[in-house]
Amino acid sequence: MTTPSRSLPVHAPMHQFASADRHLLIGGLPLERLAARVGSTPFYAYDRTLLRSRVVELRAALPASIKLHFAMKANPMPALVGFMAGLVDGIDVASAGELKIALDTGANPHEISFAGPGKRDVELRQAVAAGVLINLESFREVAILANISAELALPARVAVRVNPDFELKGSGMKMGGGPKQFGVDAELVPELLSAIGKTCLQFEGFHLFAGSQNLKAESICEAQQKSYELALRLAAYAPSPVRFLNLGGGFGIPYFPGEQRLDLTTIGDNLAQLATRAAVEMPEAELVIELGRYLVGEAGIYVTQVVDRKVSRGQIYLVVDGGLNHHLSASGNFGQVIRKNYPVAIGNRMDCEQKESVSVVGPLCTPLDLLADKMDLSVAQPGDLVVIFQSGAYGASASPQRFLGHPEVIEVLV
């Protein structure tokens, strides 16, 4: 048997879920009981209590005047979106499909915003009819929305998504700065604002999103400051006062060994300073931050059952009934350059002292179907339940569920 090396970086502790009698608890239920209730594996489970706690924690750290939007692309499960809609101030969508889910939850259309670089004409028409805020990402959309507004006798509500001239340092995925398909380059925005002013469109403000999955508070603060300054400069060219300023998000969660949780204190202080400035410099503007992963990522787990235990030339493999078809991110095939392990546990053998080095692999006929590579886990046998933490965001909806014809994954809100 082996034990983890003290010299190597380890995962941040997954203390958000309690355990009892060696069973992980989700929504207060022991994992095996929850699995029986679900009926089969694999499945995703999202904990309501943790979702609510994250929003409460965030609101306590941020100024009361800052509005909180949920970017539902992180997890568009309808029941979860409906639950989140009751906790946050608004929903950000990225397609007409997501817009339908948001509207079905009863979310206030005035607090729904729609972003995306390739909105189809029919999607724009749906958005205008629904009365949601549309984040313009090109000159093309101005002309189309002007025609739709005239046809429906309903001025489209618009904000300009700006591609800034800076990046979010340390972000896992850069969404702005340099050439990007997202938004309108900052230097072209004055021209776009002039075009908007010549139409019946109802201009409301700006949307800036420099990057995502950042664990460095100072980098997030710097991006927020630069975003605010850029919006303030561009406001001088706007056809009407700024009423909406989305400063983006970028808040990360710890996935991999050596990563630590984000400290909100510095970010809250920085936003308080910006809110004070905005009250004077853009008095009609509501400041918004848009978060997805940070709100839901740590509240979810992926559960898959061991179907076989194999030893190949000294290496132990746990073969489970779900894989990259359900959890592409955990396999390392959703943006990772060098594959790293998510935090993983044997969910019905928590706190067991007997450990061994194993690799957890899925049922697919590809070597890419690897969920854990040589990790020290509790000794497991067929029938045991493997849990992948940090799975509440970019899980089921970001995975190729029809690949090789295996069953689609179940999702439950507990």
Image: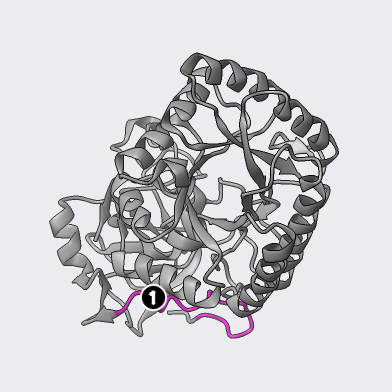
Query: Is residue 184 toward the left or the right of residue 284 in the image?
Result: right
The kind of secondary structure the magenta stretch mainly shows is loop
User: Residue, x 33% and y 82% (percent of image)?
Assistant: 351
User: Left of 124 or right of it: where is 16?
Assistant: left
Q: Is residue 279 visible?
A: yes
Residue 388's place in the image compared with 197, above or below, is below
Give the image location of residue 138, x and y in percent.
70, 28
86 relative to 273, above or below: above
Which one is nearer the viewer's eye here, 283 or 140?
283
Q: Which kind of residue does numbered mark 1 sit on?
A: Gln
Q: Residue at x 42, y 36 (%)?
A: 99
Residue 14 magenta-drawn? Answer: yes
Q: Quadrant of residue 205?
A: top right
Residue located beneath label 1 in the image: 16
Is residue 356 one of those drawn in magenta? no
Front-most of 115 and 337? 115
The magenta-colored residue range is 4-18
Left or right of residue 43: residue 295: right
